[in-house]
């Protein structure tokens, strides 16, 4: 069954996908577009993010937004909501993903700090009140949440 069949209720929904330039975030963005949603993709991989948004068409837009920088996050959320004309949902997906599976002594303090800034502080700050109100029912925060129940094959 296609994503479009499973997710008819996403039509016209306005969604921000963080860390959407590649990997699961790119798959979330593509699935959302397939279901008729409008999507802003943010990331620090600007070339990949822009290329993906272009490939997905006029309902997708890319914005550069570094989750480690509170001011960039604040501006990014505002710009995303402006482009979308509001916001209905958030896929809080951006993360540093190559720092796990190491012994404690093999993790540099700088790496620890960067992971905390991106993976922990970033999502917390993303949900701080901005000039944009939270969507009805609040923000969805789990990177593991599949958009509108797309099941693995
Ligand atoms: N792949 C899995 O099996 C799996 C399992 C459970 C949870 N997750 C979670 O799903 C999410 C995506 O995982 P993935 O496997 O696609 O990883 P990935 O590394 O391919 O994607 C992460 C994205 O986050 C972006 N990112 C990194 N630092 C950033 C920053 N400072 N600001 C903005 N964006 C930044 C990266 O550029 C990348 O596009 C992560 O939150 C991960 O923890 C993944």
Image (cartoon, grey):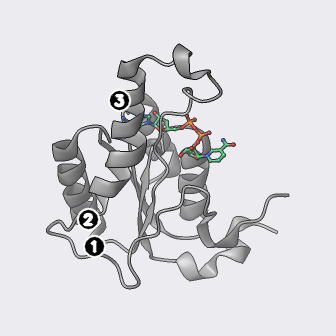
Residue visible at 30% across and 63% down in the picture: 127
Tell me the CA gap for discs 1 and 3. 33 Å
* Sequence-earlier tag: 1 or 3: 1
Residue 62 seen anywhere in this rendered image of the structure: no
Query: Is label 2 in a helix, a strand or a loop?
Result: helix
Q: Is residue 45 left or right of residue 30?
A: left
Mark 1–mark 2 distance (CA, rounded to whole Å): 5 Å
Residue 19 appears at what percent x and percent y?
A: 45, 43
Rendered image: mark on residue 114:
none
- Name the element at disc 1: loop
> Mark 3 = which residue?
113
Res. 86 mark? 1
Of callouts 3 and 2, which one flags the residue occurring earlier in the amino acid sequence? 2
- Give the residue drawn at x 61%, y 57%: 144
Residue 122 position, x and y percent, is 33, 47
Q: Residues within 10 Å of mark 3 (few under 14, many from 20)?
A: few
């Amino acid at each position: 069954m296609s994503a479009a069949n499973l997710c008819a209720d996403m039509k016209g929904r306005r969604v921000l996908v963080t860390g959407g330039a590649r990997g699961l975030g790119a798959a979330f963005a593509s699935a959302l577009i397939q279901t008729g949603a409008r999507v802003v993709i943010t990331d620090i991989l600007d070339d990949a993010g822009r290329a993906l948004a272009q490939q997905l068409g006029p309902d997708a837009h890319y914005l550069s937004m570094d989750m480690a920088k509170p001011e960039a996050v604040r501006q990014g959320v505002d710009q995303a909501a402006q482009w979308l004309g509001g916001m209905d949902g958030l896929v809080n997906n951006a993360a540093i993903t190559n720092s796990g599976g190491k012994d404690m002594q093999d993790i540099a303090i700088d790496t620890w700090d960067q992971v905390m800034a991106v993976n922990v502080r970033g999502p917390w700050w993303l949900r701080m009140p901005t000039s944009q109100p939270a969507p009805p029912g609040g923000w969805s925060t789990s990177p593991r949440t599949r958009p509108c129940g797309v099941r693995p094959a």
